[in-house]
Amino acid sequence: MKVLLLGGGGREHALAWKLLADDPSLELICAPGNAGIAEICDCVPLKATDINGLAAFAQRAEIELTVVGPEGPLEAGIVDLFSQSGRRIFGPTHRAARIETSKAFAKKMMGKARVATAAASLHKDMGDAKRAVRQSGTPVVIKASGLAAGKGVVVARSVEEADRAIEMILGERIFGEAGAELLVEEFMAGEELSMFAITDGENVVPMLPAQDHKRLLDGDIGPNTGGMGAYAPVSLASSALTQQITDTILLPTLAALRDAGHPFTGLLYAGLMLTAEGPKVVEFNCRFGDPETEAILPLMKSSLLELVHSVASGESLRDAEPIEWLDAHAATTVIAAPGYPDAPCTGDTIRLPPCPNGIHIFHAGTRRDATTGELITAGGRVLAITGVGDSLAEAAACSREYAELVTFDGKQMRRDIGWRELERNARAS
Ligand code: AMP
Ligand code: GLY
């Protein structure tokens, strides 16, 4: 089968690796890919958001299945475009993808579905937004409604900080039209959990819950990033909690989307806060998470390809078997470029030591120099190193120790991936 994978990050390298592990005879092509993906399949230099170029390519190359990594092409309507010409594609339509691309729409759907989430008010006017901050008190969360590459959220500890975020988003439009509307949202305290489910629009096949590390620095301090590391499984996510999340969050949200005339198929990602009152939604995403995917897929025994193919073919998941997982732990350390997340500095030579057993090296922002063949940094997040072991302590140590050996100028990485779980384990023993 000929499969096209869109994107070029660590998530897509992990997806490419897993799809090929599921079927080594797969003819996989990635657009645009990166230096690591190019080692395992063909890459074509088409941007993932060039949906017309991709449609023409898919027709020429007789692509039988397309898997979309990032949200950009989904927002641009690639699923609508491919479906119109009868081409099999895994992901939601433009309108259904608004569960991620419009926080205002997501709140509306959650309201209809009675899904637990932070109380929020929506504002286009700076004065109104500032008044809402004074009513809610601090800490308070200010969020651009549209897509802002994971940077559109400010957890403000003071009224002044909240006011400044409102001025930057609504006044200075630092996120462009994504900040034409913003949410003033109640702060939720607790641990975060990422839960992915593959869905046909009605039924879900949940994946192993994971925990992301959004802050840049050890101990969960510093600015928010796309994610500096992840681990799975998470002991807090018992099978009872996973079932509760499925029944009270995932299924009702999918029902609300169907009722609104926008059934969602593909991968629904619930970013959750495990609060004292139970799990509440921080955000939904309409695609696999990054770097959680790099931690989850190495533990997946069942075929991802079969599930993705079924959903893209319009088949029902009602009788789908639960996914089988290795009885092991995975931890992923992201290695980022200097200046990430604000202004990453790229173009540095990377030295990668040989890969030991139990380690997966997933490339994110990397490219090969055309003349020297050297590996060069080409993005904010450069590599995702996943260690797999019998315990989280072992997996995290493998991941960290290998990541320490990777060199390029100004490399940034966290050295405490899984710290909350490791502390929990230490308290329990
Ligand atoms: P989002 O882009 O909505 O996932 O937000 C990015 C990060 O900001 C989340 O992963 C949380 O760490 C934090 N955050 C967002 N909303 C809230 C909230 N209502 N309460 C506490 N933290 C939040
Ligand atoms: N890890 C966060 C995200 O993929 O949005």
Image: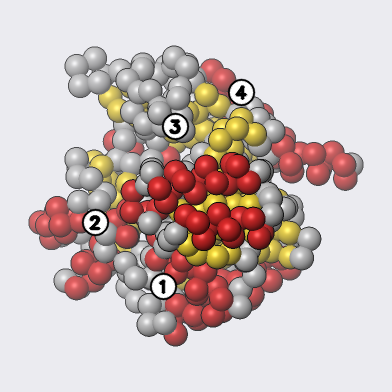
Whether the residues at callouts 4 and 1 have beta carbons within 8 Å, the answer is no
Specify which label sits upstream in the sequence, 2 or 3.
2
- Image height of 100 relative to 315, above or below: above
Whether the residues at callouts 1 and 3 have beta carbons within 8 Å, the answer is no
Q: Nearer the viewer, mark 2 or mark 3?
A: 3
Identified by mark 3, the residue type is Asp
Q: Is residue 148 visible?
A: no
Which residue is denoted by mark 3 in the rendering?
342
| Disc 3 crowd, CA 10 A, few/some/many (<14, 14-19, 20+) | few
Specify which label sits upstream in the sequence, 1 or 3.
1
Whole-number angstrom distance, CA of label 1 to CA of label 2: 24 Å
Identified by mark 2, the residue type is Lys
Q: Nearer the viewer, mark 4 or mark 3?
A: 3
Q: Nearer the viewer, mark 4 or mark 1?
A: 1
Q: Is residue 186 left or right of residue 311?
A: right
Specify which label sits upstream in the sequence, 2 or 4.
2
Say which residue appears at 24% left-offset and 14% top-offset: 372
- Cβ at disc 4 under 8 Å from ligand 2: no
Which residue is denoted by mark 1 in the rendering?
264
| Disc 1 crowd, CA 10 A, few/some/many (<14, 14-19, 20+) | many
Whole-number angstrom distance, CA of label 4 to CA of label 3: 26 Å
Q: Quadrant location of the C terminus?
A: top right
- Image height of 312 relative to 412, above or below: below
Which residue is denoted by mark 2 in the rendering?
2
Q: Nearer the viewer, mark 2 or mark 4?
A: 4
Q: Position of residue 229 (x, y in %)?
A: 57, 38
Q: Is residue 397 visible?
A: yes
Q: Nearer the viewer, mark 1 or mark 2?
A: 1
Specify which label sits upstream in the sequence, 1 or 2.
2
Which residue is denoted by mark 4 in the rendering?
401
Q: How is the image coloured?
A: secondary structure
